[in-house]
Every structure is written in C-alpha cells, then in structure tokens.
Amino acid sequence: MSVFGAVLTNLLFNTLPAFWVALALSLLVFRVLRLERSALGLAVLLLPFLKVALETARGVPAASFLWLSERGVRQSLGEFRVGVGATPAAGPRLIAELWARHAGGRAPQSAGDLCSRFLRAKLGEHAAPALAFAVLAVSLGGLALLVRRRVRAASEVRHLAARATLLEHRRVGGRSVRVLESAEYRGAPFAAGVRAPFIVLPLGLRARLGDVELEGVLLHELAHVARFDLVLLVALEVFAALFWFVPSVAFARRRVAALLERRADDAALAAGVRSEALASALLLTAELAQAPSPAAHPSVIGLRSELSERVHRLLAAAPPERRFGGSRARAVVALLRAAVVVWCSFGILAAVAFGNHAG
C-alpha cells in the first residue's frame, strides 16, 4: 500500500506542471499562428488535456528514482537541467528535468517525488499518501456526482423532447436532426443527442425572430451536432471532475467552449447567414432566455461571459483576406501551416516538465 501511495502521489502532483506547461505552450501556438478561425485551433487547445492523459497513462518508468527510494536508497545530490531546442522529427524541444544522484549513479525523479519527500519530512511518513488518497477520493466522488447529474439531465431532456412539437427535420452529416419547439422550456435553444440528435427551441422564439435570424440559430446548433461538440464537452467535464485540483483546468475548458461557439458562428456565416442577423439573434435569444440550457448541452448563447465578445466579433468589419496568389498557392500555405501546427503539437506532447520521463 505504501508503494501504491507513493505512485499515486507522484502521478497526482505531476499533473500540475505537465498541464501548466502544455497550456502555456498551446496558447502561445494558438496566438502566434492565429488559429482562432482554424479547425486546427481546437486541436491545439485540447493538447493540455491530452498531455495529462498521456503522462498519467505512461505511469512511473522503471528507471525512476521513486522505485529506488522505496527500496531505501537515499539521494546524495540533486541535479536540475533545463533546455530549449528543436529536432526535425519531434518538434520544439523543451526540457526541465530533475535528477537524483545516489551511491549507484543517478536516476530521474519528478516534482511529485520532491513534494512527497517534503511532506514526509515535515508531516510524517504517511502524510503524502494520505493527501493523495484524499484527492483521489474527492475526484471519484466528483465523477460519481457528475455521472448522476448527467444521467438526470439526459432524462429530463428526453422527457422534454418527447412532449415538444416537431417543427421539421434537417439533415447533417448523414443524420436526421429533429427541430422541436417546447412550451415547457424557457431557456436558450440547444442541441442534444448523439445517435438521434435534436434541437429544442422555446415556445415564442420563432415569433420574435425573423426568418433569417431563426435560420442562423438553427445553423449554429446544427454545426454543434455535425461536429459532436456535446461529446467533447462531456469528456472535458469528466476530465475536470477527475483533475479538479489543477487550478487552470476550468480556464482551459472555457477556452475550448468559447472556441466551439465561435466555430459554430462561423459555420452559420459560411452557410450564408449575415453576421448582423446572427448577432441580432444572439442578443434577442439571450434577452428572452429565462433559464440556462441543460448542463453541457451546446446552446446558441454558449458562455454568457463570452457573448459580448462574440457579438462584437460578428459586427466588426472582417479584415481583408491576404492573398498569396492562386488557389494552389493558398493550398500550399494552408498545408505548411498545418505542418507547423503538427510539428509544434508533437513538441508540446513530448515536453518534459519536471515529470517522470526525463531522458
């Protein structure tokens, strides 16, 4: 049990620097390469979540000093190494490593190991494992509450849809999407369902919106359905429940959710809806909504804190496109941009941030 506690402490503590470094690097790539309107932007913003998942799944390597310390080997000297570089195959290289020297040589260690030893020295032998088990218990409890809340919300949404009036069917991605109007619902329009998706409109919204505005709302929600945004939002909810102790997780989730809403706005604009009409629909829908949409379901309002920015974005004059020649030249530029994003992404995922996998 003591070894399990040490491993658990190691993995939990190591999520913090791994997530923070990956988040900082991904935001840098997102900003420098101007990925706000690119599908690649979503992939870049998801890298911190993927980084933590990969680091946790890889566990503690056999060469780690943790295993030696559990066998009674004591550290005689510590080493710290930091470096920045690049390799053609693996992308930008960021290294922040910790090493432990001992009688038999040296072995990599992590920030989690140092924190564990500090707690043992200050609070006792069982302090670090006790803290780790407490964090794990809260994570599992939060996950259980999330599952319960999601099951209840899904049941309520199904009952709401069953009593709603069918207005029409739309086709998106080979699936039929029902457009429903509910006399019981007073929130913002939202999309729900994966295998049998549908969109719920509150009663009276059609009367207040013009045909163009209503079409913008529907196209926005259809974009969420086509891209399976609901699945992604629920997955991020699960991640946030398990890693609640990482302060920046909520910030990263909001960035992803905001990008999903902007992408859905862009999909409606690409389908022919005027930006002024969509902005008007957003404002009027937010004004009429008396209740939030069900938890995690994508709605046309999205994050209310981002609503003003989205409206200003829609109403702002679009900057003139920079032309790089013909369609072939633009395709080459897009390909090169994607290659740079992939190259940087490999570097972010391979970054060593005081974790177990120093090399």
Image: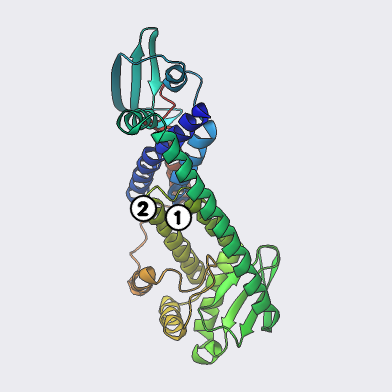
Q: Vertical placement of 4 versus 284: above or below?
A: above
Q: Whole-percent x and y of residue 129? A: 44, 35
Image location (x, y in percent) of residue 50: 49, 43
Residue at figure coordinates x 54%, y 49% from the top left: 140
Figure check: 334 above or below 4: below
Instruction: State the SS at label 1.
Output: loop
Numbered circle sitting on residue 38:
1
Check disc 2 and give the amino acid type: Arg
The disc label shown at residue 34, or none: 2
Up-down relation of residue 43 to residue 311 (above or below): above
Can you see residue 256?
Answer: yes
The reply to whether discs 1 and 2 touch (Cβ–Cβ < 8 Å) is yes
Side of 125 relative to 331 (left or right): left
For marks 1 and 2, give the CA distance. Answer: 8 Å
Closer to the camera in the image, 50 or 100: 100
Q: Residues within 10 Å of mark 1 (few under 14, many from 20)?
A: some
Residue 358 badge:
none
